[in-house]
Image (spheres, rainbow, N blue to C red):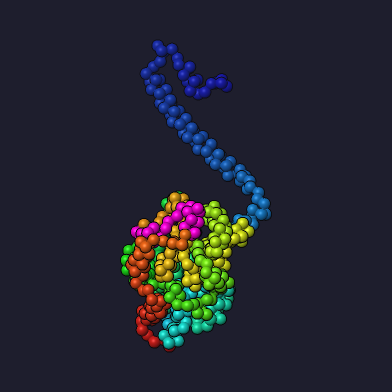
Amino acid sequence: MSADTSPITELAHSDPPQNSVEPHDLLTRLAQLEQFNGEVAQAIDSLVTTVLDVQQKAEALKPPPPVPQRSSQEVDALRAKVKELENRLAQEAMVRHVTEVSKAHPKRRTAVFLGRKFFCDNIKYTWLAMTERAKALDVDCWFLPLDESTCDTVERLGGGRCLPFRASEWTAEHINVVFSAAVLVTDDHFITVGPNIAAFLAGARHIQLWHGIGIKDVGYANIPPLSAFSPHTAKVLSTCGPFSTFVSTSACLEPEWRRSFSFERYATLGYARNDVLYREPGIRDLENVDTDTLALMRKARHAGGRVFLYAPTFRDARLGSWITDIGLDAIAQKMSRRGDTLIVNLHPCEQDRIPQLQPSMPHVRFVRPNTDIYPLLRESDALITDYSSVLFDYLHLDRPVIQFQPDYEQYVTRSRKLHDDKDTTLVGPVLKTPEALLALLASPKLETPSHTAKRQELLARLYEVRDGSSAEKLCQLIVEEIERAVQRVPRQ
Protein backbone atom coordinates (compact mmCIF):
# COMPACT_ATOMS: atom_id res chain seq x y z
CA MET A 1 0.00 0.00 0.00
CA SER A 2 1.47 3.29 -1.05
CA ALA A 3 1.80 6.03 1.44
CA ASP A 4 -0.78 8.23 -0.34
CA THR A 5 -3.56 5.70 -0.71
CA SER A 6 -6.17 4.62 1.84
CA PRO A 7 -7.39 1.06 2.35
CA ILE A 8 -10.61 1.94 0.54
CA THR A 9 -8.84 3.25 -2.58
CA GLU A 10 -6.53 0.29 -2.58
CA LEU A 11 -9.44 -2.12 -2.58
CA ALA A 12 -11.16 -0.17 -5.26
CA HIS A 13 -8.14 -0.41 -7.58
CA SER A 14 -7.14 -4.03 -6.94
CA ASP A 15 -10.08 -5.74 -8.60
CA PRO A 16 -8.96 -8.72 -10.74
CA PRO A 17 -10.23 -9.05 -14.30
CA GLN A 18 -14.03 -9.60 -14.45
CA ASN A 19 -13.80 -12.99 -16.18
CA SER A 20 -11.51 -14.48 -13.49
CA VAL A 21 -13.66 -13.72 -10.46
CA GLU A 22 -15.54 -16.60 -8.88
CA PRO A 23 -18.95 -16.07 -7.11
CA HIS A 24 -17.67 -17.28 -3.75
CA ASP A 25 -14.80 -14.78 -4.02
CA LEU A 26 -17.31 -11.96 -4.56
CA LEU A 27 -19.26 -12.97 -1.45
CA THR A 28 -16.05 -13.09 0.58
CA ARG A 29 -14.95 -9.70 -0.60
CA LEU A 30 -18.44 -8.19 0.08
CA ALA A 31 -18.31 -9.48 3.62
CA GLN A 32 -14.86 -7.93 4.03
CA LEU A 33 -16.08 -4.58 2.75
CA GLU A 34 -19.09 -4.55 5.12
CA GLN A 35 -16.88 -5.39 8.07
CA PHE A 36 -14.41 -2.68 7.12
CA ASN A 37 -17.19 -0.13 6.68
CA GLY A 38 -18.40 -0.78 10.23
CA GLU A 39 -14.87 -0.41 11.58
CA VAL A 40 -14.45 2.90 9.73
CA ALA A 41 -17.73 4.23 11.13
CA GLN A 42 -16.65 3.30 14.65
CA ALA A 43 -13.29 4.93 14.08
CA ILE A 44 -14.92 8.16 12.88
CA ASP A 45 -17.27 8.23 15.87
CA SER A 46 -14.36 7.62 18.20
CA LEU A 47 -12.33 10.32 16.50
CA VAL A 48 -15.14 12.89 16.77
CA THR A 49 -15.64 12.06 20.44
CA THR A 50 -11.93 12.42 21.08
CA VAL A 51 -11.77 15.80 19.29
CA LEU A 52 -14.71 17.18 21.28
CA ASP A 53 -13.20 15.95 24.51
CA VAL A 54 -9.89 17.60 23.68
CA GLN A 55 -11.64 20.86 22.82
CA GLN A 56 -13.51 20.88 26.14
CA LYS A 57 -10.32 20.23 28.07
CA ALA A 58 -8.54 22.93 26.13
CA GLU A 59 -11.29 25.43 26.94
CA ALA A 60 -11.08 24.48 30.61
CA LEU A 61 -7.31 25.04 30.58
CA LYS A 62 -7.64 28.57 29.09
CA PRO A 63 -7.04 31.35 31.62
CA PRO A 64 -10.20 33.37 32.52
CA PRO A 65 -10.61 36.72 30.77
CA PRO A 66 -8.94 39.53 32.67
CA VAL A 67 -11.17 41.38 35.15
CA PRO A 68 -11.31 45.05 34.18
CA GLN A 69 -9.36 47.10 36.65
CA ARG A 70 -11.41 49.70 38.54
CA SER A 71 -10.15 52.74 40.35
CA SER A 72 -10.52 53.02 44.10
CA GLN A 73 -13.14 55.73 43.53
CA GLU A 74 -15.21 53.36 41.39
CA VAL A 75 -14.93 50.61 43.99
CA ASP A 76 -16.01 53.01 46.75
CA ALA A 77 -18.95 54.15 44.63
CA LEU A 78 -20.03 50.53 44.06
CA ARG A 79 -19.77 49.79 47.76
CA ALA A 80 -21.83 52.87 48.57
CA LYS A 81 -24.49 51.83 46.05
CA VAL A 82 -24.72 48.34 47.53
CA LYS A 83 -24.95 49.84 51.02
CA GLU A 84 -27.70 52.22 49.86
CA LEU A 85 -29.72 49.34 48.42
CA GLU A 86 -29.26 47.33 51.62
CA ASN A 87 -30.43 50.29 53.70
CA ARG A 88 -33.42 50.86 51.43
CA LEU A 89 -34.52 47.25 51.68
CA ALA A 90 -34.07 47.32 55.45
CA GLN A 91 -36.09 50.54 55.67
CA GLU A 92 -38.92 49.12 53.58
CA ALA A 93 -39.02 46.05 55.81
CA MET A 94 -39.07 48.23 58.91
CA VAL A 95 -41.91 50.38 57.53
CA ARG A 96 -44.00 47.26 56.90
CA HIS A 97 -43.41 45.91 60.39
CA VAL A 98 -43.94 49.25 62.14
CA THR A 99 -47.18 49.74 60.21
CA GLU A 100 -48.44 46.39 61.49
CA VAL A 101 -47.49 47.29 65.07
CA SER A 102 -49.22 50.68 64.82
CA LYS A 103 -52.45 49.11 63.59
CA ALA A 104 -52.44 46.49 66.34
CA HIS A 105 -51.34 48.78 69.21
CA PRO A 106 -54.05 49.76 71.75
CA LYS A 107 -55.17 53.37 71.33
CA ARG A 108 -55.48 56.10 73.95
CA ARG A 109 -57.21 59.49 73.99
CA THR A 110 -54.32 61.08 72.14
CA ALA A 111 -54.42 63.29 69.04
CA VAL A 112 -51.32 64.06 66.97
CA PHE A 113 -51.32 67.16 64.75
CA LEU A 114 -48.92 67.18 61.80
CA GLY A 115 -47.43 70.61 61.19
CA ARG A 116 -46.66 72.23 57.86
CA LYS A 117 -43.47 73.97 56.82
CA PHE A 118 -44.51 76.72 59.23
CA PHE A 119 -47.21 77.32 61.87
CA CYS A 120 -50.22 78.26 59.78
CA ASP A 121 -53.48 77.34 58.10
CA ASN A 122 -56.15 74.94 59.38
CA ILE A 123 -53.69 73.00 61.52
CA LYS A 124 -52.67 76.16 63.39
CA TYR A 125 -56.20 77.29 64.22
CA THR A 126 -57.51 73.80 65.00
CA TRP A 127 -54.52 73.22 67.30
CA LEU A 128 -55.13 76.55 69.09
CA ALA A 129 -58.79 75.68 69.62
CA MET A 130 -58.14 72.07 70.66
CA THR A 131 -55.42 72.87 73.20
CA GLU A 132 -57.72 75.41 74.86
CA ARG A 133 -60.32 72.63 75.35
CA ALA A 134 -58.03 69.60 75.74
CA LYS A 135 -58.28 69.33 79.52
CA ALA A 136 -62.06 69.58 79.54
CA LEU A 137 -62.33 67.06 76.71
CA ASP A 138 -59.81 64.67 78.33
CA VAL A 139 -57.55 64.61 75.27
CA ASP A 140 -53.74 64.60 75.10
CA CYS A 141 -52.61 66.85 72.24
CA TRP A 142 -49.24 66.34 70.59
CA PHE A 143 -47.79 68.39 67.75
CA LEU A 144 -45.43 66.87 65.16
CA PRO A 145 -43.38 69.80 63.79
CA LEU A 146 -41.13 69.96 60.76
CA ASP A 147 -38.72 72.56 62.13
CA GLU A 148 -37.32 73.87 65.38
CA SER A 149 -39.06 77.24 65.12
CA THR A 150 -42.52 75.68 65.06
CA CYS A 151 -41.58 73.44 67.96
CA ASP A 152 -40.57 76.52 70.00
CA THR A 153 -43.86 78.25 69.11
CA VAL A 154 -45.98 75.27 70.12
CA GLU A 155 -44.18 74.80 73.41
CA ARG A 156 -44.45 78.51 74.23
CA LEU A 157 -48.22 78.51 73.57
CA GLY A 158 -48.76 75.58 75.95
CA GLY A 159 -51.81 73.37 76.21
CA GLY A 160 -50.16 70.49 74.37
CA ARG A 161 -46.80 68.88 73.90
CA CYS A 162 -44.41 68.77 70.98
CA LEU A 163 -42.63 65.75 69.54
CA PRO A 164 -38.97 66.40 68.71
CA PHE A 165 -38.66 67.56 65.10
CA ARG A 166 -35.52 65.43 64.84
CA ALA A 167 -36.61 61.80 64.82
CA SER A 168 -33.22 60.78 66.22
CA GLU A 169 -34.20 62.49 69.49
CA TRP A 170 -37.37 60.45 69.96
CA THR A 171 -37.42 58.52 73.22
CA ALA A 172 -39.36 55.37 74.01
CA GLU A 173 -42.08 57.64 75.42
CA HIS A 174 -42.40 59.47 72.10
CA ILE A 175 -42.65 56.21 70.18
CA ASN A 176 -45.32 55.00 72.57
CA VAL A 177 -47.24 58.26 72.02
CA VAL A 178 -47.45 57.84 68.26
CA PHE A 179 -48.15 54.10 68.47
CA SER A 180 -51.06 54.73 70.85
CA ALA A 181 -52.41 57.88 69.13
CA ALA A 182 -56.10 57.48 68.40
CA VAL A 183 -56.28 60.33 65.88
CA LEU A 184 -53.93 61.94 63.37
CA VAL A 185 -54.91 65.42 62.11
CA THR A 186 -53.40 66.81 58.89
CA ASP A 187 -54.27 69.49 56.35
CA ASP A 188 -51.94 68.49 53.51
CA HIS A 189 -50.34 65.44 51.91
CA PHE A 190 -48.72 63.22 54.54
CA ILE A 191 -45.33 63.02 52.83
CA THR A 192 -43.28 65.66 54.61
CA VAL A 193 -42.24 63.47 57.56
CA GLY A 194 -41.04 60.50 55.53
CA PRO A 195 -42.25 56.90 55.47
CA ASN A 196 -40.82 55.89 58.84
CA ILE A 197 -42.78 58.41 60.91
CA ALA A 198 -45.91 57.85 58.82
CA ALA A 199 -45.70 54.14 59.65
CA PHE A 200 -45.77 54.85 63.39
CA LEU A 201 -49.11 56.64 62.92
CA ALA A 202 -50.64 54.17 60.44
CA GLY A 203 -53.06 52.83 63.04
CA ALA A 204 -54.54 56.22 64.00
CA ARG A 205 -57.84 57.44 62.59
CA HIS A 206 -56.86 60.09 60.07
CA ILE A 207 -58.74 63.41 59.89
CA GLN A 208 -57.85 65.36 56.75
CA LEU A 209 -58.65 69.09 57.06
CA TRP A 210 -57.09 69.92 53.69
CA HIS A 211 -56.22 73.52 52.85
CA GLY A 212 -58.82 75.03 50.64
CA ILE A 213 -61.69 74.60 48.23
CA GLY A 214 -60.42 73.32 44.91
CA ILE A 215 -60.04 75.61 41.94
CA LYS A 216 -57.54 73.33 40.21
CA ASP A 217 -57.11 69.57 40.01
CA VAL A 218 -55.39 67.83 42.93
CA GLY A 219 -54.88 64.27 44.16
CA TYR A 220 -56.30 61.50 42.03
CA ALA A 221 -57.76 64.11 39.67
CA ASN A 222 -54.25 65.33 38.82
CA ILE A 223 -52.69 62.05 37.60
CA PRO A 224 -50.23 62.78 34.76
CA PRO A 225 -49.58 60.61 31.69
CA LEU A 226 -47.18 57.71 32.15
CA SER A 227 -44.42 59.61 30.35
CA ALA A 228 -44.48 62.19 33.15
CA PHE A 229 -45.07 59.73 36.01
CA SER A 230 -42.33 59.77 38.66
CA PRO A 231 -41.58 58.25 42.08
CA HIS A 232 -42.63 61.54 43.65
CA THR A 233 -45.95 61.41 41.80
CA ALA A 234 -46.56 57.92 43.15
CA LYS A 235 -45.64 59.04 46.67
CA VAL A 236 -48.08 61.97 46.54
CA LEU A 237 -50.88 59.76 45.22
CA SER A 238 -50.26 57.25 48.01
CA THR A 239 -51.10 59.98 50.55
CA CYS A 240 -54.53 60.76 49.04
CA GLY A 241 -56.27 58.39 51.43
CA PRO A 242 -57.96 56.51 52.76
CA PHE A 243 -58.93 59.03 55.46
CA SER A 244 -61.33 58.36 58.29
CA THR A 245 -62.92 61.78 57.82
CA PHE A 246 -62.40 64.40 55.15
CA VAL A 247 -63.37 67.91 56.29
CA SER A 248 -64.82 70.34 53.79
CA THR A 249 -67.24 73.23 53.67
CA SER A 250 -70.37 72.12 51.80
CA ALA A 251 -72.27 68.99 50.81
CA CYS A 252 -72.29 70.14 47.18
CA LEU A 253 -68.51 69.66 47.01
CA GLU A 254 -68.44 66.01 48.13
CA PRO A 255 -68.50 64.46 44.60
CA GLU A 256 -65.59 66.67 43.61
CA TRP A 257 -63.52 65.73 46.66
CA ARG A 258 -64.23 62.03 46.15
CA ARG A 259 -62.64 62.32 42.70
CA SER A 260 -59.47 63.59 44.36
CA PHE A 261 -59.28 61.65 47.63
CA SER A 262 -60.47 58.47 49.36
CA PHE A 263 -62.32 58.78 52.69
CA GLU A 264 -64.94 57.09 54.88
CA ARG A 265 -66.82 60.10 56.23
CA TYR A 266 -67.35 63.59 54.84
CA ALA A 267 -67.83 66.47 57.33
CA THR A 268 -69.01 69.94 56.25
CA LEU A 269 -67.63 71.84 59.24
CA GLY A 270 -65.74 74.57 57.39
CA TYR A 271 -62.13 75.70 57.74
CA ALA A 272 -60.75 76.76 61.11
CA ARG A 273 -58.55 79.38 59.43
CA ASN A 274 -61.66 81.30 58.32
CA ASP A 275 -62.81 81.89 61.91
CA VAL A 276 -60.32 84.73 62.33
CA LEU A 277 -62.10 86.59 59.50
CA TYR A 278 -65.11 86.94 61.81
CA ARG A 279 -63.25 88.37 64.82
CA GLU A 280 -60.45 90.70 65.77
CA PRO A 281 -57.30 88.53 65.94
CA GLY A 282 -56.15 87.73 69.45
CA ILE A 283 -52.59 87.27 70.68
CA ARG A 284 -52.60 83.55 69.87
CA ASP A 285 -54.08 84.23 66.41
CA LEU A 286 -51.10 86.47 65.64
CA GLU A 287 -48.54 83.74 66.25
CA ASN A 288 -46.35 83.46 63.15
CA VAL A 289 -48.00 86.45 61.45
CA ASP A 290 -46.01 89.18 59.69
CA THR A 291 -47.06 91.81 62.22
CA ASP A 292 -44.89 94.51 60.57
CA THR A 293 -46.85 94.16 57.35
CA LEU A 294 -50.08 93.94 59.33
CA ALA A 295 -49.25 97.25 61.04
CA LEU A 296 -48.38 98.82 57.67
CA MET A 297 -51.72 97.79 56.21
CA ARG A 298 -53.63 99.17 59.20
CA LYS A 299 -51.72 102.43 59.04
CA ALA A 300 -52.35 102.84 55.29
CA ARG A 301 -56.08 102.27 55.67
CA HIS A 302 -56.26 104.59 58.67
CA ALA A 303 -54.64 107.29 56.53
CA GLY A 304 -57.38 106.92 53.95
CA GLY A 305 -55.53 104.87 51.37
CA ARG A 306 -56.63 101.58 49.91
CA VAL A 307 -54.73 98.35 50.51
CA PHE A 308 -54.69 95.58 47.92
CA LEU A 309 -53.42 92.11 48.75
CA TYR A 310 -52.06 90.19 45.76
CA ALA A 311 -52.01 86.44 46.53
CA PRO A 312 -51.24 84.34 43.42
CA THR A 313 -50.81 80.60 43.38
CA PHE A 314 -47.67 78.82 42.16
CA ARG A 315 -46.96 77.48 38.67
CA ASP A 316 -45.89 73.89 38.03
CA ALA A 317 -44.23 75.26 34.89
CA ARG A 318 -41.82 78.20 35.24
CA LEU A 319 -41.90 78.01 39.03
CA GLY A 320 -41.09 81.50 40.35
CA SER A 321 -39.77 82.87 37.06
CA TRP A 322 -43.19 83.98 35.77
CA ILE A 323 -43.32 86.74 38.41
CA THR A 324 -40.69 88.83 36.63
CA ASP A 325 -42.78 88.98 33.44
CA ILE A 326 -45.93 90.69 34.75
CA GLY A 327 -44.55 94.15 35.56
CA LEU A 328 -45.22 93.83 39.28
CA ASP A 329 -42.81 96.54 40.42
CA ALA A 330 -44.23 99.08 37.96
CA ILE A 331 -47.74 98.28 39.16
CA ALA A 332 -46.72 98.78 42.81
CA GLN A 333 -44.94 102.05 42.02
CA LYS A 334 -47.90 103.57 40.18
CA MET A 335 -50.30 102.48 42.93
CA SER A 336 -48.08 104.09 45.56
CA ARG A 337 -48.15 107.42 43.70
CA ARG A 338 -51.94 107.38 44.03
CA GLY A 339 -51.74 106.70 47.77
CA ASP A 340 -52.64 103.01 47.51
CA THR A 341 -50.60 100.10 48.87
CA LEU A 342 -49.86 96.77 47.20
CA ILE A 343 -48.97 93.83 49.44
CA VAL A 344 -47.75 90.65 47.72
CA ASN A 345 -47.98 87.22 49.30
CA LEU A 346 -46.33 84.60 47.11
CA HIS A 347 -47.33 80.97 47.40
CA PRO A 348 -45.13 79.03 49.88
CA CYS A 349 -43.73 77.01 46.96
CA GLU A 350 -42.26 80.23 45.50
CA GLN A 351 -41.41 82.27 48.58
CA ASP A 352 -37.80 81.16 48.51
CA ARG A 353 -37.42 83.34 45.37
CA ILE A 354 -38.10 86.57 47.27
CA PRO A 355 -34.41 87.34 48.04
CA GLN A 356 -33.67 87.19 44.29
CA LEU A 357 -36.82 89.12 43.31
CA GLN A 358 -36.68 91.92 45.88
CA PRO A 359 -33.64 93.82 44.45
CA SER A 360 -35.36 94.15 41.06
CA MET A 361 -38.71 95.04 42.68
CA PRO A 362 -37.92 97.75 45.23
CA HIS A 363 -41.49 99.09 45.30
CA VAL A 364 -43.07 95.71 46.12
CA ARG A 365 -43.85 94.84 49.73
CA PHE A 366 -43.60 91.06 50.05
CA VAL A 367 -45.19 89.34 53.03
CA ARG A 368 -42.51 87.69 55.12
CA PRO A 369 -42.06 84.08 53.95
CA ASN A 370 -43.48 81.18 55.92
CA THR A 371 -46.06 83.23 57.80
CA ASP A 372 -49.83 83.04 58.29
CA ILE A 373 -51.71 85.51 56.05
CA TYR A 374 -55.30 85.10 57.34
CA PRO A 375 -55.20 88.00 59.83
CA LEU A 376 -53.83 90.12 56.94
CA LEU A 377 -56.87 89.40 54.76
CA ARG A 378 -59.03 91.41 57.13
CA GLU A 379 -56.85 94.50 56.62
CA SER A 380 -57.19 94.61 52.82
CA ASP A 381 -59.80 96.48 50.81
CA ALA A 382 -59.73 93.98 47.95
CA LEU A 383 -58.04 90.75 46.95
CA ILE A 384 -56.08 90.31 43.73
CA THR A 385 -55.49 86.67 42.84
CA ASP A 386 -55.37 84.35 39.85
CA TYR A 387 -56.04 80.63 40.31
CA SER A 388 -55.66 80.42 44.09
CA SER A 389 -58.25 78.95 46.46
CA VAL A 390 -57.72 81.98 48.73
CA LEU A 391 -60.42 83.51 46.51
CA PHE A 392 -63.01 81.37 48.32
CA ASP A 393 -61.72 82.28 51.78
CA TYR A 394 -62.02 85.95 50.91
CA LEU A 395 -65.73 85.52 50.19
CA HIS A 396 -66.32 85.59 53.96
CA LEU A 397 -65.31 89.27 54.02
CA ASP A 398 -67.79 90.28 51.30
CA ARG A 399 -65.20 92.51 49.59
CA PRO A 400 -64.14 92.85 45.94
CA VAL A 401 -62.13 90.07 44.30
CA ILE A 402 -60.03 90.84 41.21
CA GLN A 403 -58.74 87.95 39.10
CA PHE A 404 -55.49 88.91 37.39
CA GLN A 405 -54.61 86.13 34.90
CA PRO A 406 -51.89 87.34 32.50
CA ASP A 407 -50.75 83.78 31.69
CA TYR A 408 -54.08 81.96 31.53
CA GLU A 409 -53.43 79.91 28.37
CA GLN A 410 -49.98 78.86 29.52
CA TYR A 411 -51.26 77.98 33.00
CA VAL A 412 -54.09 75.70 31.88
CA THR A 413 -51.89 73.96 29.29
CA ARG A 414 -48.62 73.63 31.22
CA SER A 415 -49.54 73.76 34.92
CA ARG A 416 -53.04 72.72 35.99
CA LYS A 417 -56.49 72.13 34.64
CA LEU A 418 -59.00 74.47 36.30
CA HIS A 419 -62.45 73.58 37.57
CA ASP A 420 -65.12 75.37 35.58
CA ASP A 421 -68.14 74.50 37.73
CA LYS A 422 -67.88 77.20 40.41
CA ASP A 423 -68.40 80.24 38.16
CA THR A 424 -65.41 81.99 39.70
CA THR A 425 -65.12 84.27 36.67
CA LEU A 426 -68.37 85.93 37.79
CA VAL A 427 -67.29 86.96 41.30
CA GLY A 428 -65.19 89.87 40.06
CA PRO A 429 -63.38 91.36 37.06
CA VAL A 430 -61.05 89.04 35.14
CA LEU A 431 -58.05 90.89 33.71
CA LYS A 432 -55.32 89.69 31.35
CA THR A 433 -52.82 92.58 31.22
CA PRO A 434 -51.00 94.83 33.71
CA GLU A 435 -52.46 97.86 31.93
CA ALA A 436 -56.01 96.63 32.49
CA LEU A 437 -55.25 95.94 36.15
CA LEU A 438 -53.84 99.44 36.70
CA ALA A 439 -56.84 101.01 35.02
CA LEU A 440 -59.25 99.14 37.28
CA LEU A 441 -57.28 99.91 40.46
CA ALA A 442 -57.44 103.62 39.61
CA SER A 443 -61.23 103.44 39.57
CA PRO A 444 -63.27 104.10 42.72
CA LYS A 445 -65.55 101.20 41.77
CA LEU A 446 -63.79 97.84 41.66
CA GLU A 447 -66.79 95.69 40.80
CA THR A 448 -70.37 95.74 39.55
CA PRO A 449 -73.53 94.93 41.54
CA SER A 450 -73.70 91.60 39.71
CA HIS A 451 -70.23 90.72 41.01
CA THR A 452 -71.36 91.47 44.57
CA ALA A 453 -74.46 89.32 44.19
CA LYS A 454 -72.44 86.44 42.74
CA ARG A 455 -69.94 86.56 45.59
CA GLN A 456 -72.69 86.38 48.16
CA GLU A 457 -74.44 83.55 46.33
CA LEU A 458 -71.20 81.58 46.03
CA LEU A 459 -70.42 82.05 49.72
CA ALA A 460 -73.82 80.65 50.70
CA ARG A 461 -73.44 77.69 48.36
CA LEU A 462 -69.86 76.73 49.25
CA TYR A 463 -69.88 77.35 53.01
CA GLU A 464 -72.45 75.84 55.34
CA VAL A 465 -70.68 77.32 58.39
CA ARG A 466 -70.36 81.12 58.15
CA ASP A 467 -70.19 82.28 61.76
CA GLY A 468 -66.60 81.74 62.88
CA SER A 469 -67.33 78.48 64.73
CA SER A 470 -65.54 75.93 62.51
CA ALA A 471 -62.64 75.30 64.94
CA GLU A 472 -65.06 74.54 67.78
CA LYS A 473 -66.92 72.04 65.60
CA LEU A 474 -63.63 70.42 64.55
CA CYS A 475 -62.71 69.87 68.20
CA GLN A 476 -65.90 67.89 68.64
CA LEU A 477 -65.11 65.88 65.51
CA ILE A 478 -61.70 64.97 66.92
CA VAL A 479 -63.33 63.74 70.13
CA GLU A 480 -65.80 61.64 68.11
CA GLU A 481 -62.97 60.01 66.17
CA ILE A 482 -61.06 59.35 69.38
CA GLU A 483 -64.10 57.61 70.79
CA ARG A 484 -64.30 55.45 67.70
CA ALA A 485 -60.64 54.50 68.03
CA VAL A 486 -60.66 53.61 71.71
CA GLN A 487 -64.16 52.11 71.52
CA ARG A 488 -65.30 54.35 74.34
CA VAL A 489 -62.98 52.65 76.82
CA PRO A 490 -61.86 55.17 79.52
CA ARG A 491 -58.17 55.93 79.51
CA GLN A 492 -56.20 54.19 82.22
> Residue 11: where, in percent of width, then height?
47, 20
> Residue 182: where, in percent of width, then height?
42, 78
Q: Nearer the viewer, residue 385 or 445?
A: 445
Q: Is residue 55 magenta?
A: no
The region drawn magenta spans 421-442
Q: Which residue is most to the right?
A: 72
Say which quadrant the N terminus sits in.
Answer: top right
Residue at left offset 53%, top offset 76%: 287
Q: Examine the rendering and report whether any part of residue 310 can be seen.
A: yes
> Residue 159: where, in percent of width, then height?
50, 83
Q: Is residue 426 magenta?
A: yes
Residue at left offset 50%, top offset 62%: 310
Q: Nearer the viewer, residue 85 or 385?
A: 385
Residue at left offset 67%, top offset 51%: 71
Say which quadrant the C terminus sits in.
Answer: bottom left
Q: Is residue 72 above or below residue 22?
A: below
> Residue 22: where, in percent of width, then height?
39, 17
